[in-house]
Image: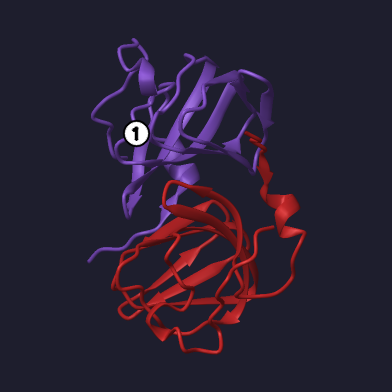
Chain colours: A purple, B red
Amino acid sequence: MDIEKVSLKEKFGKFNDYWSPKIVGELNDSYIKLAKFKDEFVWHKHDDEDELFLVIKGRLTIKLRDKDIELNDGELVIIPKGVEHLPVAEQEVQVMLVELKSTVNTGDMSGSAMTVENLDWI
Amino acid sequence: MDIEKVSLKEKFGKFNDYWSPKIVGELNDSYIKLAKFKDEFVWHKHDDEDELFLVIKGRLTIKLRDKDIELNDGELVIIPKGVEHLPVAEQEVQVMLVELKSTVNTGDMSGSAMTVENLDWI
């Protein structure tokens, strides 16, 4: 078995597209993904999946219907299943995600132009 | 529903004991845990659970039977189920873990003095 470490910095250097998560690892029934966000995503929810956002570099706002959550480097939030949310970043932000393998980025809005299926491993 | 962000730095400031993971979040069937390591743990494996170690601050060596993996800030490794490993830290290291809720820190060595059950939330 080939067990290798993952450098987040090195992986973030491998892509530049926004809102398109890349897989860097899997454990149990989950993927570890990295993504760069800029500007505004789409309001959505995941009916059956909780989702973790950890900011590695930059600033990310997760808008909820009743408040905004502001995340800086080293801050994370877990959005429970069923909760509508809208990620927004004024400047580019680097984010690590922990998600069930079944999770689609746009959740219940999976017909959106922002939807990414068949994610790449990097 | 009360959704709050988690600052890793703030949480690491709340405890000083080594090898005793604290829970800071849950998603799906997993916990997000923080731990401080120093010196050497015990060789063990988790028969049914993969385990993620992300170094937040410091340097961590994960010894495997056939090689050592050296992790610095912003580097992670996933140890697959069944693989024996030994975490070692010459100096204090701050680590974020992603684990199934069923995971016990010492795995198959759960009779060890290092075993921690009934983890605290911080």
Residue at 27 percent of width and 34 percent of height: A120
Looking at the picture, tell me which residue is in the foreground, B51 or B48: B48
Q: Is residue A77 left or right of residue A24?
A: right
Q: Position of residue A68 (x, y in %)?
A: 67, 23
- Looking at the image, residue A65 lies above or below residue A46: above
Q: Within the image, what quadrant is residue A10 found in?
A: top left
The C terminus of chain A lies in which quarter of the figure? top left
- Looking at the image, residue B20 lies above or below residue A50: below
Q: Within the image, what quadrant is residue A115 found in?
A: top left
Looking at the picture, tell me which residue is in the foreground, B78 or A27: A27
Looking at the picture, tell me which residue is in the foreground, B101 or B72: B101
Tag 1: residue type? Thr
Q: Is residue B38 left or right of residue A47?
A: right
Q: Position of residue B84 (x, y in %)?
A: 34, 78
The N terminus of chain A lies in which quarter of the figure? bottom left
Q: Within the image, what quadrant is residue B103 found in?
A: bottom left
How many numbered discs? 1
Q: Position of residue A46 (x, y in %)?
A: 41, 28
Using the image, name the chain to which the residue with label 1 belongs: A
Q: Which residue is mark 1?
A: A103
Density class for disc 1 (Cα within 10 Å; few <14, some 14-19, many ≥20) is some
Q: Position of residue A106 (x, y in %)?
A: 39, 21
Q: Residue furthest front?
A: B1
Residue at 58 percent of width and 55 percent of height: B73
